[in-house]
Image (tube, rainbow, N blue to C red):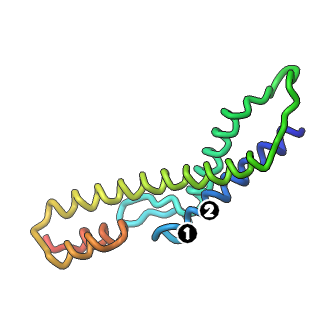
Amino acid sequence: MEIFWMIVIVIVGGAAGGFVNVFIGDSGLHLPKFENGVFLPGFLGTMIVGALAALGSWGAAKAITIFGPATVPPNFSTGDIANALIVGFGGAKWFKSETEKDVLQKTAAIAAGKPPDPGAALAIASGTPMQALSAAVQMHS
């Protein structure tokens, strides 16, 4: 049962790191949704990715025996918790960056198919990825 609680703490730490990542940047605190044809994972998505990243990192570093006789008793330290938070944050940041990359690629594809619009170009260059996509969608054909 001891290993179970270690895993739970790592998952919670990774999810917390992912949750903190929600407040960095412009994505804000929202549930998963589709906007302008793009899936936005919201805070739940970043927390899940953070939890999985932390669990994967911890599992690779610890290599605890799950089935069979344990040759070395498992140990758990504050370093494991700190690692879960940091890896959870980093995993969520990667996930958010991939989502924003997809949004910006869609923005470029839409804008490239429309006539030049200086106002939209300014909005695309200075806005968040979702604001840029909105500006591209609203460009005149």
- Between 41 and 67, the residue placed more toward the observer is 67
- Residue plotted at (78% across, 30% down): 64
Residue annotated with mark 1: 23
Q: Is residue 7 left or right of residue 87?
A: right
How far from the left and from the top, in percent, is residue 136? 24, 69
Look at the image and tell me in which quarter the C terminus lies: bottom left
The amino acid type, in three-letter code, at marker 2 is Phe
Quadrant where the N terminus sits is top right
Could you tell me residue 20's position as x and y percent? 61, 64
Gap between marks 2 and 1 measured at Cα = 8 Å
Residue 44, image x, y percentages: 60, 59
Residue 19: mark in rendering: 2
Residue at figure coordinates x 26%, y 70% from the top left: 124
Q: Residue furthest left?
A: 115
SS under mark 2: helix
Seen as rendered, the residue at the extreme bottom is 119
Q: Secondary structure at mark 1?
A: loop
In the figure, residue 69 lies in which quadrant? top right
Mark 2 Cα shell of 10 Å, populated few (<14), some (14-19), many (≥20): many
Rendered image quadrant of residue 68: top right
From the viewer's side, name the closer residue of 51 and 139: 51
Residue at 62 percent of width and 62 percent of height: 19
Specify the quadrant of the image occupied by residue 135.
bottom left
Could you tell whether 3 is left or right of 26 in the image? Answer: right
Residue at x-position 16% and y-position 60%: 112
Amino acid type assigned to the residue bearing label 1 in the image: Phe
Callout 2 touching callout 1 (CB < 8 Å): no
Where residue 119 appears, x then y in whole percent?
Answer: 18, 79
